[in-house]
Image: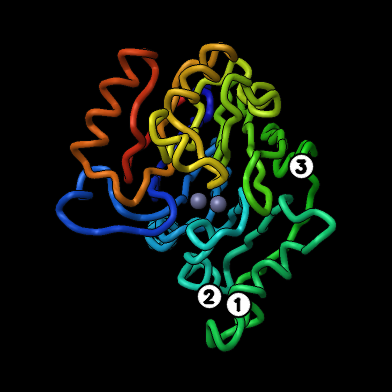
Amino acid sequence: MAKPDFTVKFWGARGSIPVSGPDFARYGGDSSCVEMRCGEHLLMFDAGSGLKRAGIEIEEKGLKRLDMFFSHCHWDHIFGIPFFMPFYRGSMKIRIWSGHLAGVMTTHEMISGIMKAPYFPIAPEIFIADVDYRDFKPGDVLTPHDGVTLRTGSLNHPNGAVGYRVEFQGKCACYITDTEHVPGKLDQNVLKLIDHADLVIYDAAFVEKEMQRYRGFGHSSWEEGVRLCRAAKARKLAIFHHSPLRTDSELDAIGKDAQAAFSGAFVARQGQVIEL
Ligand SMILES: [Zn+2]
Ligand SMILES: [Zn+2]
């Protein structure tokens, strides 16, 4: 029997705010949303504006179950939630997991917090799907399904964020956004999560020469992504969480530089599918 597939799809690779227009046509303008398919199991990471189109595909394919994991709940990672059509279908079973606010706010409170008057007219109680809210602590190991293991760890970001390492069938993909590095000091939490990973999706909102200006914003650079992947002996690096200012041609240039430095590096593009 053939091994079940492990695929990763980028529904949105932009950070901070969605963008549109001719300068952003190729890499896409939707904000953070990444799907991982582990055989028949569907995992979604973050609910930025990219989640809207993911919902359309889930309905077209008739999928009925989904686990959704949050890095954190800054707007660009969560505002797709009310517009995700599977929440309004009685046939869907959806589990929502978060751990960045462990002990401060539950996952249910986090979702209720964004679907609340006067910022939004309806509350999540309107969802018709079977929605199960799960809470965990950074560092916990999650097994949403037999054979699918998620290792988690804290990232360095204002208000906290969680990075994930997903293991399935001997392969491993990591979702590491949003996070800021300390110059000259590789982040041990990140190194542990990405050790020998097949794919590392990494927050590279900035390039190294911009870092000085944006210290404290909670984001990193592709150069740091390369250093981390080299140290951890990871195979592929997906440059992710693109600045809303970064045009397609600028991202092309970044991709070239990054690939020259690390042959497994590439710039994540909305709609792109990676098979592990
Ligand atoms: Zn973000
Ligand atoms: Zn953030």
Q: Residue 248, which numbered label?
A: none
Residue in the picture at 62% in, 28% down: 168
**Of 158 and 126, which appears nearest the observer?**
158
Say what amino acid the circle numbered 1 marks.
Ile
Mark 1 and 2 residues: CB-CB less than 8 Å, in contact? Answer: yes
Q: Is residue 45 above or below residue 260?
A: below
Q: Check disc 3 and give the amino acid type.
A: Pro
Specify the amino acid type for callout 2.
Tyr
Helix, strand or loop at disc 3? loop
Residue 128: give its label: 1
Q: Which mark is residue 138?
A: 3
Q: Nearer the viewer, residue 169 or 180?
A: 180
Residue 163, horizontal then vertical, whole percent:
63, 38
Q: How dense is the environment of label 2, judged by Cα within 10 Å: few (below 14), some, or many (20 and up)? A: some
- The answer to whether residue 205 is left or right of residue 156 is left
- Visible in this render: residue 106? yes
Q: In the image, residue 44 lies at what x, y percent?
A: 54, 49
List the single residue furthest toward the right: 103
Rounded to the nearest angstrom, the CA distance separating label 1 from label 2 is 5 Å
Give the class, few, some or many, for how many residues have Cα within 10 Å of label 1's Cα (few <14, many ≥20): some
- Residue 122: give x, y in percent of width and height: 57, 85
Query: Which label sits on residue 88?
Result: 2
Q: CA distance from mark 2 to mark 3?
A: 30 Å
Q: Earlier in the sequence, mark 1 or mark 2?
A: 2
Comparing 258 with 168, the one in front is: 258
Q: Nearer the viewer, residue 28 or 173?
A: 28
Q: Secondary structure at mark 1?
A: loop
How far is mark 1 from mark 3, CA to CA? 30 Å
- Residue 166 lies, with reference to residue 57, above or below; the image says above
Residue for point 67% across, 54% down: 159
What residue do we see at 63% from left, 77% from top? 124
Q: Secondary structure at mark 2?
A: helix
